[in-house]
Image (cartoon, rainbow, N blue to C red):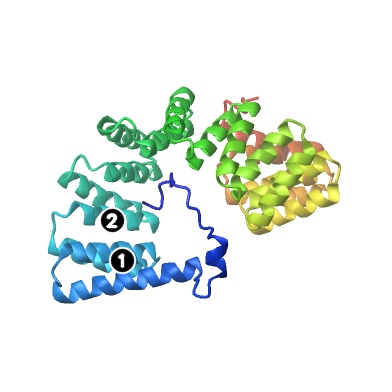
Amino acid sequence: MIRWLTSTKRHDEERSADELGSEDSESEDTKKKVTFLQVMEMLNERMRKTPNDAEVHLARGELFMMAGRSADALKDFNQAIAIDPKNASAYYHRALLQYRRVQPEQALADVQQALSIRPQYQEALLLSGLVRASLQQSDLALADFSACLAIDPNNVAALHYRGRLHCQLEHVEEGLQDLNRSIQLDGAMFAAMFDRAMLHFQQKRYDEALEDLNRALRLNPESAEALNIRGLVHFNNRSDLEALMDFNLAITLSPGNASIYRHRATLYHALKREEDAIKDIHKSVELEPTDESYNHRGRYLARLMQYDQAMEDFNKAVELNPNEAFHCFCRSSLHNVLGNEEQATEDYNRASALDPESYPPR
């Protein structure tokens, strides 16, 4: 199973009481390590006997990739291609490795080579679509997913990825149709369930979003992101206690996720727990010192009438992303509060030039 595909299998790693009590029982990690070493030794032995077998290099490369040894995997994939330049699977796996290493241009070249050899290669079509989507080639990515579905209309992964991309492009109906179909075919697919929940949330269909998030969390109870979004749904439904419980658990599971702290800060502010709110906002900026984080903290500080600190944050937001109209608008609003009419007008005009639809010229 490819790592970037959501697994549709539920692995039960629990053992029986008899096994747990057995003197020769092993941990799952130990078992996996033993299995890895056994398979690796078998492949190495085959390599010694047939050093020019491309399939052996390919199999060992896949094993290295599964173990996170990307440099070793790349060597084997390169060797497999050198031995057999028409091996579509070798190009595909090298492309997958490059995609994981965030090398989309190289990944695209290899996956297209795989498809030139085997045009009906469904996994390669899926990977090509994902790579093109990462390169903002949305129309070509949609075409790749659709080509995969032309081969197999029930390809759950293709339906999910096309649906997700439609949602990102704000093709709401198309996205919902694909996500519905993927979930209909595989009701245990966490990622599709979560993506449909996100679509419902963005459309302010909070009851539907909550239903999907509850189902998703039954599939993966330790998903901090699903808990984070469910917390937002509860917040919008004015279920503050449930929201706080979700944010708290999400932070326990993912303490480095800045967005959860921002969301919990918003809840704390609504509950008038300002000291807790400002702690979370400072933490979010510490974890993720982006223009959006500085803007968020600036708006909060402005509400607390801590204008000097707020202006510092708006200045930093504009410095980091001078082409974001909202940052300029926020700083303009604060200048208005402070009576700085000239600076306020200058920032508003700048916001209007960047986004005249949201900030019409005055």
**Residue occupying image coordinates x 47% and y 22%:** 173
Residue 102 visible (yes or no)? no
Residue 132: x %, y % from top left: 34, 43
The answer to which image quadrant residue 327 occupies is top right
Residue beneath label 2, please?
Answer: 93
Residue 113: x %, y % from top left: 20, 49
The answer to which image quadrant residue 329 occupies is top right
Q: Nearer the viewer, residue 149 or 341?
A: 149
Q: Nearer the viewer, residue 124 or 106?
A: 124
**Residue occupying image coordinates x 55% and y 64%:** 18
Q: Are circles 1 and 2 on residues that touch, CB within 8 Å? A: yes
Residue beneath label 1, please?
Answer: 73
Q: Is residue 195 above or below residue 56?
A: above
- Residue type at mark 2 is His
**Residue occupying image coordinates x 25% and y 63%:** 59
The answer to which image quadrant residue 152 occupies is top left
Mark 2 neighbour density, 10 Å: few (under 14) some (14–19) many (20 or more): many
Residue 274 visible (yes or no)? yes
Residue 183: x %, y % from top left: 46, 33
